Amino acid sequence: MSTVTARRGMVICAGGFEWNQELRNRYFTIPGDRRWSSTPEEANRGELLQAAMEIGANVEFMENGWWVPTMSKPMRGVSNFHEIHQVTFDVGRPHSVCVNRNGDRFVNEACGYDRFGNAMIKDQLETGKNAPCWLVFDATFRRKFPAGGLHAFAKHAR
């Protein structure tokens, strides 16, 4: 075991805590469900963070996250289980729009994933209608592009 000393403090980089529902509830502005995380299941549980806080560490910026958009898709043949897919590159394509439960567009979908996530949070705080949101697309999108776990339609040979 090593001892590290510092005059004014130290920075510990130990990953996130997105698989720890208690920490999500405590620190995230909109906690969401830990199952919505795009990281491997049970990864990033915040153990080092909790150990540091137990010995008096101060923490900051805990409300921030990676905010990668994800899509929940029921898994075929398995009851009550949903696959989670990143849709970082699936939003912002032609023939699609992201909307809240009111059907209102809340973001320019072509923005970066962090801005997309922050727009979701902002809209949720303002309307209470954005956790979750929906990616709505037409037949042209469905034919040309993937969306989460949905692959683009393959062209049939004639």
Image (tube, grey):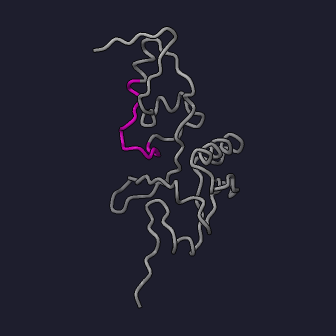
Question: Is 29 covered by the magenta stretch?
Answer: no
Q: Residue at x 42, y 84 (%)?
A: 156
Name the main secondary structure of what is drawn in magenta: loop
Question: Is 39 covered by the magenta stretch?
Answer: yes
Q: Residue at x 50, y 33 (%)?
A: 24
Quarter of the image that includes the C terminus:
bottom left
15, above or below 3, in the image: below
113, above or below 32, in the image: below
Quarter of the image that includes the N terminus:
top left
Q: Residue furthest bottom?
A: 158
Residue 48 lies, in percent from the top left, at 39, 24
The residue nearer to you, when weighing 95 against 100, is 95
119, above or below 141, in the image: above
Residue 89 lies, in percent from the top left, at 52, 57
Please identify the quarter of the rendering in which residue 37 is found: top left
Q: Is residue 151 left or right of residue 140?
A: left
Q: How many marks?
A: 0
Q: Residue at x 40, y 35 (%)?
A: 44
Residue 131 lies, in percent from the top left, at 59, 46
Please provide the residue range marked out in magenta.
Answer: 35-48
Please identify the quarter of the rendering in which residue 51 is found: top left
Residue 124 lies, in percent from the top left, at 65, 43
